Amino acid sequence: MTDEAQLLGIADELYGLALAEFTPARDARAKQLRGTDEAAPVKALRKPASAAWVVNQLVRSEAEQVEQVLALGAALREAQASMDGEELRALTKQRRQLTAAVTTRARAVARERGQRVTEAVAEQVEATLTAAMLDEDCARAVRSGLLVAPLAATGVDPVDLAESVALPGALGFTASPRPAEEAAPEARPGLHVVPDPEADAKARAAAEDALAAAEDAVQDAEHDRDVTAAEVSDLEARSLQLQAEMDELRRRLAELESAAEEVDDELSDAEQVRDAAEAGLTAARRTRDEAAAALEKLQG
């Protein structure tokens, strides 16, 4: 097995684990590989974002449904390339229905693995499935089961997947399907259960990992809350400033309207005075002309 194939196989195992198990399992595997070429790349494998983890689990648990999504995406891209408008509209409707249905199933898969999926994460899952339909490379990334970040695509511009998959070779890889869960020993008739002496320690370690993951989630949520709260405060201050400016403009507009009315009144009065002056000038000119004519007649 080549180094790349071995590394992809290790990543396949790790990204199929429960989200809280990923980091301790990755670190333990890197420790096992200490002194080999794979140790550093394994240690560098990034913990997947919640939406990426959900899609990775879906690919392993519901491979048939995922392949339906990818097959419909291929047909959609073909219809788009051939400019078949009617078929494109029909396939687009199917795409929306299918991605919504598969997203619902993905949430159920995550819930079965003890992970609650929020609406925001579900939207990222659906966006990732849509990206896989619109973009062939995104489809290959989803099929790999090695996503570390959710995907988004327009179907027009190429998608840079370097930061979205765990390894460069992921785009040529297909995730291993998850085998059916074996029945617990106590559920098998006639089988004597041998107590695990490390069961309490393992349970405590798992609980500690779950608590650490929950604390990380709380910190992330608090950070998001603080960021959005700061944005709200800034926008509220800006809104108050704009409202004050609008009030000042309204006050100034009222003053200008009042001044305009006063000027209109003064203008009307001035026009009347001007008209009277024009009439007086006309009468004075007529009287002058008559006086001049009488004088000229006497002199003649």
Image (spheres, rainbow, N blue to C red):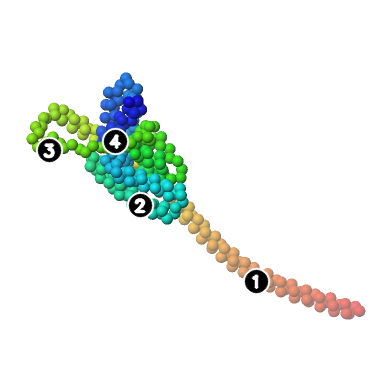
Question: What residue is pinned by disc 4?
Answer: 176
Q: Residue at 40%, 48% (x, y): give it.
A: 76
Q: Label 4 sits on what residue type?
A: Ser
Question: What residue is pinned by disc 2?
Answer: 94
Rounded to the nearest whole Å, what is the CA distance between mark 1 and mark 3? 110 Å
Label 3 crowd (10 A; few <14 / some 14-19 / many >=20)? few
Label 2 crowd (10 A; few <14 / some 14-19 / many >=20)? some
Rounded to the nearest whole Å, what is the CA distance between mark 4 and mark 1? 98 Å
| Percent position of residue 222, x then y | 32, 40
Q: Label 2 sits on what residue type?
A: Gln
**Closer to us: mark 1 or mark 3?**
3
Label 4 crowd (10 A; few <14 / some 14-19 / many >=20)? some
Question: What residue is pinned by disc 3?
Answer: 187
Q: Residue at 78%, 76% (x, y): give it.
A: 286
| Percent position of residue 192, x then y | 9, 32
Seen from the viewer's position, the closer of residues 149 and 2 is 2
- Residue 188 drawn above or below residue 264: above
- Residue 130 in view of the camera: no
Question: What residue is pinned by disc 1?
Answer: 272
Q: Do the residues labelled 4 and 3 touch (CB within 8 Å)?
A: no
Q: Are marks 1 and 3 in contact (CB under 8 Å)?
A: no
**Comes first in the chain, label 4 or label 3:** 4
- Residue 37 sits in which quadrant? top left
Rounded to the nearest whole Å, what is the CA distance between mark 4 and mark 3? 27 Å
**Comes first in the chain, label 2 or label 4:** 2
Instruction: Give the structural element (helix, strand or loop) at label 2.
Output: helix
